[in-house]
Image (cartoon, coloured by chain):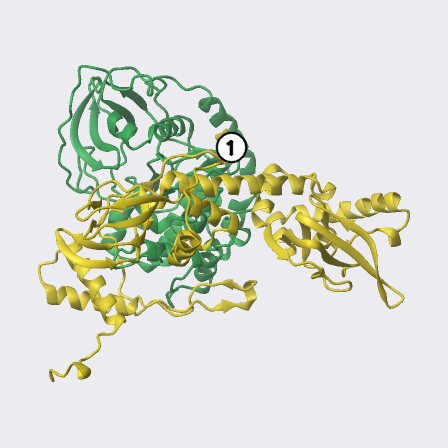
Chain colours: A yellow, B green
Amino acid sequence: MSSDSSRRIQVPEELKEVLLQFSISFLVEQPPDVIDYAVEYFTKLQSERPSVSHTDQSTDDQLSVNSQDADAEPPVMASSRRKSVFAEAYDPEADDDDDGATAVFPKTDEQRARLVESVKNVLLFRSLEKEQMNQVLDAMFERKVQPGDFIIRQGDDGDNFYVIESGVYKVYINDKHINTYNHTGLFGELALLYNMPRAATVQAETSGLLWAMDRQTFRRILLKSAFRKRKMYEELLNSVPMLKALQNYERMNLADALVSKSYDNGERIIKQGDAADGMYFIEEGTVSVRMDQDDAEVEISQLGKGQYFGELALVTHRPRAASVYATGGVVKLAFLDVKAFERLLGPCMDIMKRNIDDYESQLVKIFGSKNNITDTR
Amino acid sequence: MSQHTSQYVFNSKEDYNVILDNMSREFEERWNHQTQSPYTNLENYITRAVLGNGSFGTVMLVREKSGKNYYAAKMMSKEDLVRLKQVAHVHNEKHVLNAARFPFLIYLVDSTKCFDYLYLILPLVNGGELFSYHRRVRKFNEKHARFYAAQVALALEYMHKMHLMYRDLKPENILLDQRGYIKITDFGFTKRVDGRTSTLCGTPEYLAPEIVQLRPYNKSVDWWAFGILVYEFVAGRSPFAIHNRDVILMYSKICICDYKMPSYFTSQLRSLVESLMQVDTSKRLGNSNDGSSDVKSHPWFQGVDWFGILNQEVTAPYQPTISGAEDLSNFENFEFKDRYKSRINRHPELFANF
């Protein structure tokens, strides 16, 4: 090999990563023969290559099971019993602190931006809503370290997740050095889910700064906000006369099926004449209900927070009777898909269809005639 | 000692929903009539062997001193339960074992405690774990899998009717009796709840996406796990198992339901697994008010004699060989662990109602 530095072979990042993962696995499992283990490891790695989940149009655009067959894949048999895992119990309903306030640790805009960038691909952060993400970032606390400090030790209980702000950190498994973090990286993600003995030791080589998040705070933020949202959704569903007859379990299932949607000022939410695909609840903001009259759209009503529109779509499937637009800023809606509604309520649908005529006649009494029913039912 | 018979007869001419309603009333009575365990240690029993080791303790083979009956005694360290914050779970477990009565569920015979340990005395089911048998044969054919799956479905239906979420379904928690029928065991994570709960618990490969994502969840997590179980029965491995033990990668796959379906699965089995393993709970089979009926009426279960299964009249595809109560050939060898003995009662207030 030439000693000319310009002709040195570049080691691809992918190769580094694969060899690092293999080394970790080898050191954890401590097999008797390195070659045999390597053959087994890389054969299985090849068969487990992430395969792209295709979108199956027939199932409402949900990511479906991978279509490739698993026959060629060597079975991953659990030869030893699989242990159960568990986290501390937390009941958001019993948590008296209604605002769910957690301590806020100040961060500069740059630090905050770096944190967002660092955690964007972390599994547990991916599904966070904006408000939750802000609360989590606020609650991440600072940990200053000196050279030689142990951040985590292999085998110890794990409660914190760490994001590196600065510093160099070495990772050891069974006292063997297997990786180095250089002013960037994160570790301990599993600790946000449950207490598991740490799989590795991380030691600071230089002084540095870490941002940490503990499991209890993380779970409290997520569950408290989820609980508040569920409560709001259940109350919204409760406000619809047509859904009054539902059992508690059914109402809770519908609350699970509600999907948050945001619309900018002036954006059309539904169009008169379109097929009805579900109903909407207004979480925040106001909407304008408009009908086509003599080649022009005329506003016939405005609806605000806590109100709803389109509920007859769930049962009658008639085309939309009016158009609805977001007004006065961003509008947050909760959408209940008609297909989800039918799937969850199944046998109840017949009863609801029988009640629908009575419901419509009640509306006529209120509005004077069918033509005056001023929403998009 | 509250001896309970495990003999049930289900009349196929009766509406099964009516039977379940009656069972629900009986369950409610037992649930509301819980008694405290005496501080009698295991003085009424002779310890014969260790059957297994769990997260919080040891299961031992014991024999009654006053009779010839054999039992399994689950011994749990109070110190460990407190340290691992599992006090509420162990109370739940005792409550459930005391109240539940169903052919395919283990039940409570007796319970005692001492200064250091809690003891649950359970019927001896000495055909071994379904897990061990499954690992031995590697894969079940679909008929074989259906026999076990039907029993699990009936057990989940019963539990859900009693407003119980099981939350730890896996082959390791299913025992085989001498006739080859199942008994679901380990109710440590079972919780009585009408609606939603949010505690993360279960076994990583079997966790539903909503549990992994720390969202409130309902009984449909058991139907997700049931899908994993059926898949594992026939494929010989669980759908999300990962060779290099990267648990986070496995959870990522669970959250988008990224797994491979073996081509040898019949179309009905494929359909069942896909319907159960739905990330969107509104699409998940079993998640309607009458969810268990939807599962039982799935085409893969067509032809199952549900009353025949309930009454254990269908011949099991495998019957463990058991020569006697002390025949432990169906269990792995476990060592006795030293038991410590304190002079002071540990955490008496926390376990007063056990």
Percent across and percent down for residue A225 are 51, 42
Percent across and percent down for residue A286 are 72, 50
Percent across and percent down for residue B54 are 25, 37
| B333 displayed left or right of B182 | left
**Helix, strand or loop at disc 1?**
helix
Percent across and percent down for residue A22 are 20, 63
Q: Which residue is mark 1?
A: A93
User: Is residue B261 positioned above or below B123 on the image?
Assistant: below
State the residue in front, A209 or A55.
A209
Count how many numbered circles sit on residues in the image.
Answer: 1
User: Is residue B124 positioned above or below B239 on the image?
Assistant: above
* Residue at left offset 74%, top offset 52%: A312
* Residue at left offset 23%, top offset 62%: A21
Q: Quadrant of the C terminus of chain B?
A: top left
State the residue in front, B218 or B102.
B218
| A56 displayed left or right of B167 | right
Dot 1, how many residues are within 10 Å of its Cα: few (below 14), some (14-19), or many (20+)?
Answer: few
User: Is residue A290 positioned above or below A348 on the image?
Assistant: below
The three-letter code of the residue at mark 1 reads Glu
State the residue in front, A89 or B276.
A89
Q: Quadrant of residue B177?
A: top left
Given the image, what chain letter belongs to the residue carrying mark 1? A
Can residue B61 be seen by looking at this rendering? Answer: yes
State the residue in front, A109 or B147.
A109
